[in-house]
Image: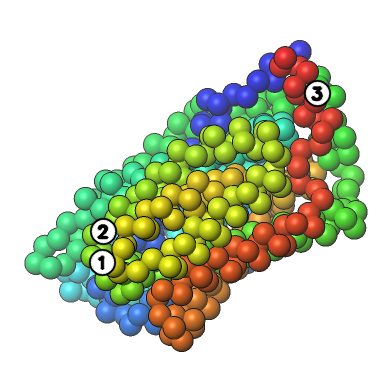
Amino acid sequence: MKNPKMNWGRAVLVSLPFFALMLFWQAYDYVIPLVLSGHYHLSTTLYSVIMSADNVIALIFLPLFGALSDRITGRLGRRTPLILSGTLGGIAGLFLMNLEDEKAVAGNVRFLPFLIFLIITVFFMSLNRAPAATVVTDCFIRPQRTKANAVLNLMGGIAGVLFGVFGHLLIKEVNGISHFSRCILFVASGMFTALTVYFFAVREVRFVKHVQDLNESLGLIDEKTDTASKEPVRLKRDELRSLFCILGSVLFIYMGYNGFHTHYSNFLTRHLLKSASWTGPYLLEVGMGMLMMIPAAFITTALGRKKSSLLGMLCCVAGYFGASTVTPEKPELLYLWFFIAAAGYPLFAINLGPMVLELGQDNESGRFMGYYYAAVTIAQIFTPTLASIFINRFDYGIIGFYGAVFTSLAFLVMLPVTHGDVKPDFLKALEDSTS
């Protein structure tokens, strides 16, 4: 029998495309607004509309490219061709945007070419978003997917920290004008390095074949894990209800999460009257979230995906609501509430994707991962504007309450879910083989 123990090293290697993806988006979300407002002198409203273009493009293409990756065949596997083309296209797009930006800084302002390069870049990065996450689940049997997803999220967190520490330092100020060439070179080099290691170290076809062999040896073959079968399996009514509930929960969770974090800097400076440089609570949240990823996977092994997700949501509800009670007189209480929220976030972040995939066939995991990211993207499109309506009616102190309400809705929508956890007989087969 092949070794069914969790291969953590393999999880790191197949997560490298996601690492490159998150490194790109960290740079994009930080640098592009500064370029549009500072170098092309666009209004806040206009550059906000342009910044939302990536979410609109993603909403259109993510399910499409996810489903497309299910149908690709060849020696590189199903996901790797889109991962390679998307990442390389994104790197090229970064350099083209930076080249046009440097011309604008030098006085040759041409916005249309920059906008065209931006749209092309976002399109290429949409190619590999669903495949970069799906390849991780493809390379592990179903009972191990939550642990693999924990590594995926951890790698994404590391990318964010690397950009936060080094990317910002490489931005050069000359006569009050920001130059981003060194920052872009750092990001592109990191993406290319991750992609190169992935290309030479990962054999997607062989890894997927290993999973199929494990499924057979452990007796985990059913209508959804049988990749030899080409017959589509229609979801039963209760499975379809669970799928919609899980996706609804994803939507509400990220409505709350993105609504809070989009306006957090203004909450900090305008409500708590703190300096924008007071990054302690934010760094605690990021660091705690990363540290909890792997422990959250072991908690899930004990409690199951649904219960772990619900527990994580409750922690976030408490954290968001607590943040809404923090006043300028005692801003240090924010550390407590961010600690609680950050402890809960990994419990649902690592489980909701695998819950969606559990309902589909292994032959169509790209399509189902596309559904998951579509729900996330819808939240990212609408929640900043919706949250701003409440901010205008009250003030920035409302965003904690806003996050708590939407996360509570996610909790309630998750309650009727009856599918998405690993089948008990699958868990028992894995436990028996490793005992």
Q: Mark 3 and mark 2 in contact (Cβ < 8 Å)? A: no
Which amino acid, by three-letter code, is at mark 3? Ala
Residue at 65 percent across and 27 percent down: it is: 207
Image-quadrant location for residue 134: top right
Residue 385, how many percent across, how many down? 50, 78
Q: Which of marks 3 and 1 is nearer the N terminus?
A: 1
- Name the foreground residue: 292 vs 27: 292
Which amino acid, by three-letter code, is at mark 2? Trp
Image-quadrant location for residue 327: bottom left
Residue 143, how many percent across, how many down? 72, 33
Numbered disc 1: secondary structure = loop
Which amino acid, by three-letter code, is at mark 1? Lys
Query: In this figure, which residue is indicated by the disc labeled 3?
Result: 429
Q: How crowded is mark 3: few (under 14 residues within 10 Å), some or many (20 or more)?
A: some
Horizontal side of residue 310 vs 105, given as left or right: right
Please state which of the two labelled residues, at mark 2 or mark 3, is closer to the viewer.
Answer: 2
Mark 1 vs mark 2, CA separation in Å? 7 Å
Residue 220 visible in the current orientation: yes
Query: In this figure, which residue is indicated by the disc labeled 1?
Result: 274
Query: In this figure, which residue is indicated by the disc labeled 2?
Result: 278
Mark 3 vs mark 1, CA separation in Å? 54 Å
